[in-house]
Image (cartoon, helix red, strand yellow):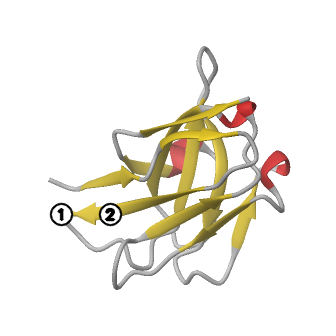
Amino acid sequence: QVQSVESGGGLVHAGGSVRLSCAASGRSFRDHSMAWFRQPPGKERELVAAISGSGGSTSYADSEKGRFTISRDDAKNPVYLQMNSLKPEDTAVYYCAVGRYVLIHVGINDYDTWGQGTQVTVSS
């Protein structure tokens, strides 16, 4: 069964940092774009950051620019999300998603393999 598995979430104080990792199983995600989405309590799932299949292009939501960094290492875990200067509004379940395409797309339907999510809670 093809799936992605997230890890690295937890409780952190505002201003702190967390690094999320996404491991793939079932097939290689090489040459597929990858993304991190998040779903805050009571809100819809939203794109946080995305990276192309080659790793050469990245895209971020405006509120994350300069604070979050997405990267990939297909030899180990497919994708990481380094989150710095965390704010309470970053509290959410974070999901790793595998894209249908090599190039970055920002629509939720452009991703067809999802993990179970990992909770990140930022306390004030």
The quadrant the C terminus occupies is top right
Name which residue lies at 45% across and 71% down.
Answer: 32
Residue linked to disc 2: 23
Q: Tell me which corner region of the image, top left, top right, bottom left or bottom right, holds residue 75.
A: bottom left
Above/below status of 74 relative to 97: below
Q: Nearer the viewer, residue 112 or 118?
A: 118
Residue 8 x/y as whole percent: 43, 53
- The three-letter code of the residue at mark 2 reads Ala
* Local crowd size for mark 2, using a 10 Å CA cut-off: few (<14), some (14–19), many (≥20): some
Residue 18 x/y as whole percent: 57, 54
Q: Secondary structure at mark 2?
A: strand
Q: Which mark is residue 26?
A: 1
| Residue 99 in view (yes/no) | no
Q: Nearer the viewer, residue 34 or 104?
A: 34
Q: Secondary structure at mark 1?
A: loop
Residue 72 x/y as whole percent: 50, 76
- The three-letter code of the residue at mark 1 reads Gly
Above/below status of 66 relative to 54: above
Above/below status of 17 relative to 56: above
| Residue at far left of view | 1
| Residue 60 in view (yes/no) | yes
Q: Measure the C-alpha gap from mark 2 to mark 1.
A: 10 Å
| Residue at far top of view | 42
Q: Tell me which corner region of the image, top left, top right, bottom left or bottom right, holds residue 76.
A: bottom left
Assess whether mark 1 and mark 2 are in contact (beta carbons under 8 angstroms): no
Q: Tell me which corner region of the image, top left, top right, bottom left or bottom right, holds residue 24.
A: bottom left
Q: Is residue 44 left or right of residue 76?
A: right
Report the number of numbered marks: 2
Name which residue lies at 21% across and 56% down.
Answer: 2
Mark 2 or mark 1, whichever is nearer to me: 2
